[in-house]
Image (cartoon, coloured by chain):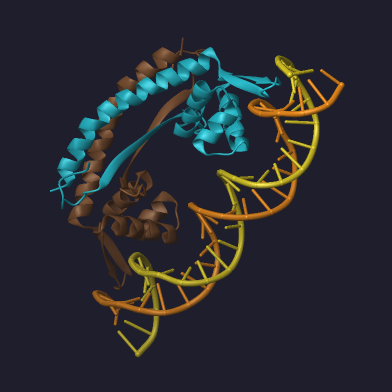
Chain colours: A cyan, B brown, C orange, D yellow
DNA sequence: TGACTATATGCAAGCAAATACATATCGACT
DNA sequence: AGTCGATATGTATTTGCTTGCATATAGTCA
């Protein structure tokens, strides 16, 4: 919440985002890709993860390829064929990454709480 | 920096962004608009601020209108006419906002430093 | 060995956002 | 009264992103 009822910034919220970038300033992966990777971890396939996020398989596949290309190593291990068509699982690096990212988000949330409060106190008079 | 030479995430950087949102999930103002408002404060006109940021006047004008519309109050006081064509200055609210935002960014930077370090330690082995 | 389904990937098409273009208004100063 | 330059705003155009479509590949299980 952003302040008491009637205050200037009532129902205005402070939001943040975190992402990885390379030296060229290109985004490697941000929130969307993290959610996708997390979905793969939970659901066992890229298709299922894409469906869950409501994006096309085509797009999801491109997101993963892009991230892995820019990182220089794979986050997922893909298998084609089989009765169920195939599946995807996270590599060790992939698991470590989403694990670290989740912890990062928690710490961010904690940090931002105090900062946000201070911001709205200052601005809401 | 993201880790020692040769480590997995060498030359990968963690970046963040902060912005204001309304209850509808619409972005009210983020980094670009803050820079624009700061430019108006420093340079005394929307045109000069737009030029400084390398964006068109048309776009800059739209950014300000959009932010003020969504906030429900004005951040700038505009004047047309005169030998110099006119000028824009920040309202009290506008000044308070960029002041608070600047302080917010400093605190964010401090907070992110520790979090970032921890993140790359975890992920760079 | 044929069916099933997810991975893999190019290409066309559709859409929304950014940018460019064009034009009007305003008022202090000369 | 005329000039000048910034504010003000609609419309057109471009562009980049998404999605959709189409098609190939793979391998396990019945």
Left/right placement of residue B42 relative to residue B125 reads left
The answer to which quarter of the image holds residue B119 is top left
Residue B19 coordinates in the image, percent (x, y): 33, 42
The answer to which quarter of the image holds residue A31 is top left
- Looking at the picture, tell me which residue is in the foreground, B119 or B54: B119
Residue A73 at least partly seen: no
Query: Which of the image's four quarters has the N terminus of chain B?
Result: top left
User: What residue do we see at 36% from left, 20% from top?
Assistant: A103
Residue B6 coordinates in the image, percent (x, y): 52, 12
The answer to which quarter of the image holds residue D4 is bottom left
- Looking at the picture, tell me which residue is in the foreground, A81 or D19: A81
User: What residue do we see at 25% from left, 46% from top?
Assistant: B98
Residue B123 coordinates in the image, percent (x, y): 44, 15
Q: Is residue A121 above or below residue A75?
A: below
Q: Is residue C7 above or below residue C16?
A: above
User: What residue do we see at 54% from left, 30% from top?
Assistant: A49
Residue A23 coordinates in the image, percent (x, y): 50, 28
Q: Is residue B45 above or below residue D10?
A: above
Left/right placement of residue B49 relative to residue A114 reads right
- Looking at the picture, tell me which residue is in the foreground, B22 or A80: A80
Q: Is residue A119 above or below residue B95?
A: above
- Looking at the picture, tell me which residue is in the foreground, C2 or A46: C2
Left/right placement of residue A45 relative to residue B27 reads right
Q: So how many labels did they put on this image? A: 0
As drawn, the residue found furthest toward the top would be B125
Residue A52 at least partly seen: yes
As drawn, the residue found furthest toward the left would be A125
């Amino acid at each position: 919440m952003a302040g008491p009822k009637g205050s200037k910034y009532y129902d205005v919220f402070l939001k943040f985002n975190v992402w990885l970038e390379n030296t060229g300033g290109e985004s490697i992966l941000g929130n969307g890709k993290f959610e996708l990777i997390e979905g793969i971890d939970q659901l066992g396939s890229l298709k299922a993860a894409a469906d869950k996020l409501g994006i096309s398989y085509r797009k999801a596949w491109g997101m993963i390829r892009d991230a892995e290309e820019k990182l220089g190593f794979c986050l997922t291990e893909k298998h084609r064929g089989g009765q169920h068509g195939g599946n995807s699982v996270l590599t060790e690096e992939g698991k470590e990454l989403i694990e670290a990212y989740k912890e990062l988000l928690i710490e961010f949330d904690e940090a931002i709480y105090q900062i946000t409060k201070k911001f709205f106190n200052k601005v809401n008079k």
